[in-house]
Image (cartoon, rainbow, N blue to C red):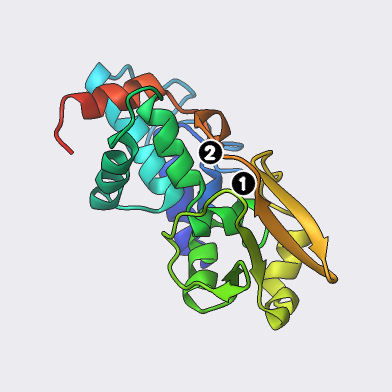
Amino acid sequence: MSKDKSKARFRIQRRLGTELPGLGKAGALERRPYPPGEHGNKRKKFSNYALQLEEKQKVMFHYGIREKQLRRFIRDAKRGNATKNWIDSLAGLLELRLDNAVFRLGFAPSIRAARQMVSHGHVLVNGQKVNVGSAVLKLGDEISLKDKSYEHQCVVQCKDAPRLDVPDYLSKEDKGGKTVGVVKEVPGTAYIPFGFSSNLFAEYYSLRSV
């Protein structure tokens, strides 16, 4: 990641007052835990709408998706969901995106890098190449890399220093001398790896058609 891109991603996290692991390198709030352009360590008081908007932006920036993509996931989460909280269903869809799973398994330093790995054909699902990062995994799916991809410098570095611990809904196993990940359960909002208010997020979209 170039220094300019790294600074831009740090600024995003400082503006939102939250570390977003999906953007990569940690430490955005360590030295300057306040928004860009402000002095002191107190954030301004925001309106309820601004707080709702922040929750949406956290999701979009962390997972690296656009508004149109997020709305499509929300529609899918709400469809046929009479008993379960649709926010939990949405979290499951986002966390089980292939690019996110590759990141959460420690194969890539960020979701953006994981998406590039997928699009370049390095990632296998159940032994078959899948090059669409937004593909949603299912229970029992197995995520692995092509043999030579395990030797890439990025993968080796992430193995030694992963950005996050592997979440409980995924397992990391050794099969034939290769590290593979397996989807063990469908995650809910508890697995979103940053400070997130599901109520504010739901309020934002309750007033807008998706």
For the view shown, which residue lies furthest in the bottom direction?
Answer: 148
Which residue position is annotated with label 1? 26
For the view shown, which residue lies furthest in the right direction?
Answer: 177
| Above or below 168: residue 47 | above
Q: x%, y% of residue 1?
A: 54, 66
| The C terminus - image quarter | top left
Of residue 209 and residue 151, the one placed in the foreground of this image is: 209
Tell me if I can see residue 95 in this picture.
yes
Q: Residue at x 23, y 51 (%)?
A: 68
Q: Residue at x 71, y 53 (%)?
A: 162
Q: Residue 16 appears in which quarter of the rendering?
A: top left
Q: x%, y% of residue 15?
A: 39, 37
| Above or below 88: residue 185 | below
Q: Which mark is residue 47?
A: none
Neighbours of disc 2 within 10 Å: few (<14), some (14-19), many (20+): many
Q: Residue 107 appears in which quarter of the rendering?
A: bottom right
Q: Secondary structure at mark 1?
A: loop
59 relative to 24 in the view: left or right: left
Q: x%, y% of residue 105?
A: 66, 54
Q: Residue at x 50, y 52 (%)?
A: 23
Q: Which mark is residue 19?
A: 2
Q: Amino acid under label 1?
A: Ala
The reply to whether discs 1 and 2 touch (Cβ–Cβ < 8 Å) is: yes
Q: Amino acid under label 2?
A: Glu
| Above or below 62: residue 119 | below
